[in-house]
Amino acid sequence: METFRAFRSMVRDSLGHITHGSKVYHLWMFLLTVVMLIGMYAYYIQLEQGLSATGMTDRVSWGLYISNFTFLVGVAAAAVMLVMPTYVLHDIDFKQAVLIGEGLAVAALIMCLAFIVADLGGPAVAWHLIPFIGVFNFPNSMLAWDVIVLNGYLFINITIPLYILFRHYQGKEAKHNIYVPGAILSVLWAVAIHLVTAFLYQGLQARPFWNNALLGPRFLASAFAAGPALIILVLAAIRKFSEFKIPDKTIRKIAIIVTVAAQINLIMLVSELFKEFYAPTHHSESAIYLYFGLEGKNALMPWIWTAIPLNVLATVLLTVHKFRSNFKILYFACFILFVAIWIEKGFGLIVPGFIPGPYGKIAEYTPTWVEIWVTLGIWALGAFVFTMLAKTAIGIELGKLRYRKKETIQSETH
Amino acid sequence: MEANKKWYQLDLGLGNKKTSQTTCGCGKSSGGCGSTKEDSRQATQSISAAEFDAAVEQEIMGDTAVAQTQKDGFQQVFDVKMDRRTAFRKLTASLLVGAGAVHTSCSITTSGEAKEKAQIDWEEQFKGNYKLMTQEEKQATVDRLVRSYQLRKKKNIKMTATDASKDVLFGYAFNISKCQGYMNCVSACVEENNQDRNSEMQYIRIHEMKDGQGFKFNEADDNYYHEVPAEGHFYMGTQCFHCDNPPCVNVCPVEATWREEDGLVVIDYDWCIGCRYCMAACPYDGRRFNWSKPEVPEEEVNKNQHYLGNRLRKKGVMEKCTFCVQRSRSGRDPACVEACPTGARIFGNLLDPNSTIRWVLENKQVFRLKEDLGTEPKFWYFMD
Ligand code: SF4
Ligand code: SF4
């Protein structure tokens, strides 16, 4: 009963907390709301017209939505890089970063699910996908696996921080033996969501561009570069806009993770390029299309040739110790790395899978405005969710939100 | 004989057949008993080349050369078990429809109809997966769909839910030397299967290739608008190959698409959530998606429908060639086979040793596309 009351009070306090804030905060939330509303309107158009409102066709049947989904699974999985050392190895530096990281994972997962729903032709019958209510093609379909692992991961990443914050809210310490098993589970689970998502593509013998054994590992490497890079940027913003103290040491440590992952990612990229271009076969056509265009069609070339130099530049900047310790350069490097991987693991991965088609037809894909706005709307939704989560978490961690406080005040006045 | 299979393989017992061909009537496995090889072939082979040509000829004339199931369309309509209530409902429904325009203006009937419509929509929205339905449930959903069409369009359609017959495995063969690229099959398919006219959806693609350059699909033109046959070109049709080990079925997260007992790979349009994973998984460009609401002019709607086949689709679902399940399961050839003026298309029961398709498989040099993928398509190409 007591716990229940405390929980209710926490929810109420958090709601109060997230509706109050500085001017910048309100402006930020307002902007996000506007983008979300436009996105919703665009989605409404898509519902009315059907998916023909997007740039997708029978020839290129997945586009921006699935690209962003793929990328965001990586971001979500990357939270684990912070969970591991903090909870299990008692590395104190990461403790604050971890709550932020898990908040980021939750936001990324919500975006993932939103992208999947946006991509469905029949969102009204999406309940067919719910285990036990619908029919679940388990274990055959990798998409069924993905639904399970993503929702499971979402559950884990909501419960662990919730438990910790709830304990802190009541002014108690979180019990080690309760959350550590959960943390270990989430570590394994994070690898699973990423591998399963890679297998989604890797398992298709119809698409040689995806059907390659390096896809899974490369997913992991790029995720562990892009995810923590985003966390660094977010931590930088939090340091600037709130009183939450994040020591330099924490950011430095995360930067090391980013660096190593970016280096491994680059090595794998070289290996992939070598395989495709040293002895090109029929199966290299997608890669040729991606990097050089085929039959005069080269819509993806500008993108990939932006991504590759950014990727290399970021990796170099991160590798050189002098640059990495300069926070301005570090933030810049993280930003371009994030963009580069978004391009590369987003539509640089999904779209060429369909080009050329099964019989060699080359039909290009260009997203429409409807699609772009829905995508922006979902990103805004993610940012919105994350801001709320982070603000509450910071409030509790700073001691601004406390269960006892109010009660003591009340009893004093009596 | 295939105990050490390393991957999935379609087994029609053709191999067995071949070995028995070399033995002669006396049972010895190699020569010496006096009977010629020709004779032994006659014994095991029930169709000769001449008969085959005659069969093809017959097909061109419009008759059906293969009869896998005994029932014809009419028998099926009348064989459908109707309990008294559905019969009553159907009767009243047709009366109402018959009375037509007068009744629609009458508020009592319309509100009653509106209620029924809502009831049908509700039940349709929350019905289960066709594959897992019992016979009664299957019939119930078919009845609902027929009734719904009556209510909406004031027209009657005939929809069946015929299941696969035993000892039938449908297969298809395509004669590359005969095809002239007329594309009669394409338009017959569109009409038969109620495909969206707006987006000009077509299940069949005819690829025009240059003579003497082999099968270069990437250089082929699958969207030509000139007179055929074009000088120096040959033609090859593709569609869903009804793989015996279909990758599209494995990947579907909700089992909205599956392989039926008679080898047809079908889709429950009402269960499909439109994720298009199957489309990505198909190596043969076999699937088509309804990107917007499919439209077929009322007078062009083919009213002879099958739940898994050519019934009208909605937006946001997957569809594809079903080997015209509404025809093939009632003993007729698919529309494309019937429409082909050259006799390039052969369809039939692979398990029937006397069928034309078996004769082709056993006597022609056949091949399939992308065999290395292990999908085991039931669609063979051959040349004269
Ligand atoms: S051709 Fe494609 S759609 Fe048809 S059964 Fe094979 S994989 Fe499935
Ligand atoms: S589009 Fe439909 S049939 Fe294809 S995989 Fe998705 S749910 Fe299954």
Image: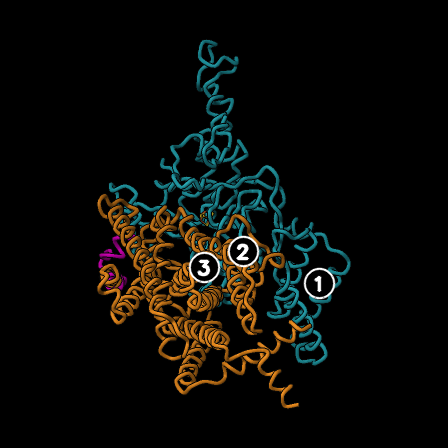
Chain colours: A orange, B cyan
Q: Nearer the viewer, residue A288 or B217?
A: A288
| Residue numbers of the magenta segment | A286-306
Which residue was labeled with disc 1?
B90
Residue that lies at the very extreme toward the front in this rendered image: A412
Which residue was labeled with disc 3?
A90
Which of the 4 image quadrants contains residue A224?
Answer: bottom left
Residue A293 painted magenta = yes
Residue that lies at the very extreme toward the right in this rendered image: B84
Q: Earlier in the sequence, mark 2 or mark 3?
A: 3
Residue A181 image label: 2
Against B132, residue A318 (above or below) is below
Res. A118 in view: no
Q: CA distance from mark 1 to mark 2?
A: 62 Å
Q: In which quadrant of the rendered image does the C terminus of chain A lie?
A: bottom right
- Helix, strand or loop at mark 2: helix
Which of the 4 image quadrants contains residue B178?
Answer: top left
Protein chain holding label 1? B
Kindly report which numbered mark, 2 or 3, lies closer to the viewer in this rendering.
3
| Mark 3 residue type | His
Q: Nearer the viewer, residue A311 or A170?
A: A170
| Mark 2 residue type | Pro
Q: CA distance from mark 3 to mark 1?
A: 73 Å
Q: CA distance from mark 2 to mark 3?
A: 14 Å
Residue A80 in the image: x percent, y percent? 44, 59
- Helix, strand or loop at mark 3: loop
Kindly report which numbered mark, 1 or 2, lies closer to the viewer in this rendering.
2
